[in-house]
Image (tube, rainbow, N blue to C red):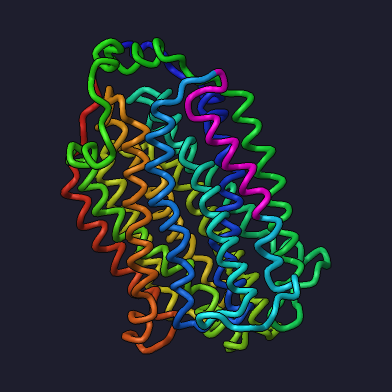
Amino acid sequence: MNRDKHLSFRQMVDLSFGFFGVQIAYALQSANISRIFATLGADPHTLSFFWILPPLMGMIVQPLIGKWSDRTWCRMGRRKPYLIVGAVIAVLVMAFLPNAGSLHFSTRVFLGLNMAMWFGLFSLIFLDTSINVAMQPFKMMVGDMVGEEQKTTAYSIQSFLCNAGSLMGYIFPIFFTWIGIKNTAPEGVVPDSVIYSFYTGAATLILCVMYTFLRVKEMPPKEYAEFHGIDLEAQKEAPKEGLLTLLRKAPATFWTVGLVQFFCWAAFLYMWTYTNGAIAHNVWNTSDTASEAYQAAGNWVGVLFAVQAVGSILWAAVLPRFKSIRLAYVLSLLLGAAGFASVMFIHNQWVLFGSFFLIGFAWAAMLALPFTLLTNALEGNPYMGSYLGLFNCTICLPQIVAAATGGFVLKAVGGGQSAMFIVAGVFLVLGALSVRLIQVKPLKQQ
């Protein structure tokens, strides 16, 4: 295996720079979807159902992108064609989604939802599908082009850029409010501060993705095979494996890290779903979605998520310094659990900074460490992209389960949205306990 090729810091940044723009779009979706649908008239007890769509699309799309891109070798590259297609579609949808309440749809209700919410739902489906198409190639390119000894650093850089993008996306609404863009609107209409945020995010997304597209040159098949120790002739003669066959042959690391992922992503789904309502009630003492106080709380959610992103950025720089990847994982999740649990008991908007800063530690670990563990376990496997696509199901499935059961859990904890943060904290503790099941593959000698 050719292990002499080392990427410079600049090359690793170029490899993931487009992720910065993609994550701005994802952050705008994460921080504002509950706000948008609540504004359009969704009930808090059904709010989590809207969050089923994004992970469901991820489960469908990302394994296919992995499978198809494993077999794609063209002039543009292997993963890059999917990257650019996803980015273009995401930009188009981002121009429409926040306008769902402004397009003068009929007030007619169909299956319990007004037509504005139906438009928002279909826009959300296309937005999350396109974000998934654009996002997955970045993870695959690190697996393709970075050696084992550099992967923790490369995925930490990706985590840093991801959280820097999140930071930008989260603060856009409050920034536009600060410069004078209206943060209130008639009932059922999304404020201009949110609409302008989506427009700005769309422009940034396409510029960042184009930067990586133009700067990064993927390996041709022969060089890729030499780098990963793959016998091209044997691979050509071997029967093509289907996704279900690959799943049956997945290494143990796939399943044990997947168990940790289940608890972690369920916790964060509850955060994305219920933060707006929890902060509006605990700090602004309102549940009226048309009120100025509720929209102010919505802006503050963006600030809190930005604080989370700052915590993630700083912690991502610390993670490569841990000698034990499992210790780093456990500590990150436990600190995040403490952050989640504290939210229920805090009624001061500024004190919440500490809670979300700690939550950022867990987020940084979730973005970097699972992919380091899995890609190292898959080293030399010709189906790297397919496995990473399948692995995305360990991100999507827990969100679907959490979204489908969110209303029942909310009722079980008394109906207070802030109580869902206790549930999220318990999930992260369970995730930390599950880390001990992961077998860490030692690095090969150079």
Residue 285 in view, yes or no: yes
Above or below, 71 against 331 in this view is above
Residue 153, magenta (yes or no): no
Q: Measured from the top left, where is residue 57 in percent x and y?
A: 45, 54
Q: Nearer the viewer, residue 200 or 292?
A: 200
Q: Nearer the viewer, residue 310 or 201?
A: 201
Residue at x 52% of width, y 71% of height:
352
Q: Quadrant of residue 372?
A: top left
Q: Which residues are magenta?
A: 75-93
Q: Measured from the top left, where is residue 241 in percent x and y?
A: 25, 31
Task: Answer left or right for 150 relative to 246.
Answer: right
Residue at x 37% of width, y 37% of height:
321
Residue 78, magenta (yes or no): yes
Q: Measured from the top left, where is residue 435 in percent x and y?
A: 22, 51
Residue at x 65% of width, y 70% of height:
299
Q: Measured from the top left, where is residue 96 in percent x and y?
A: 69, 60
Quadrant the C terminus occupies: top left
Residue at x 38% of width, y 50% of height:
366
Above or below, 410 against 130 in this view is below
Residue 160 in view, yes or no: no
Task: Answer left or right for 17 relative to 72.
Answer: right
Above or below, 171 against 163 in this view is below
Q: Residue furthest right?
A: 180
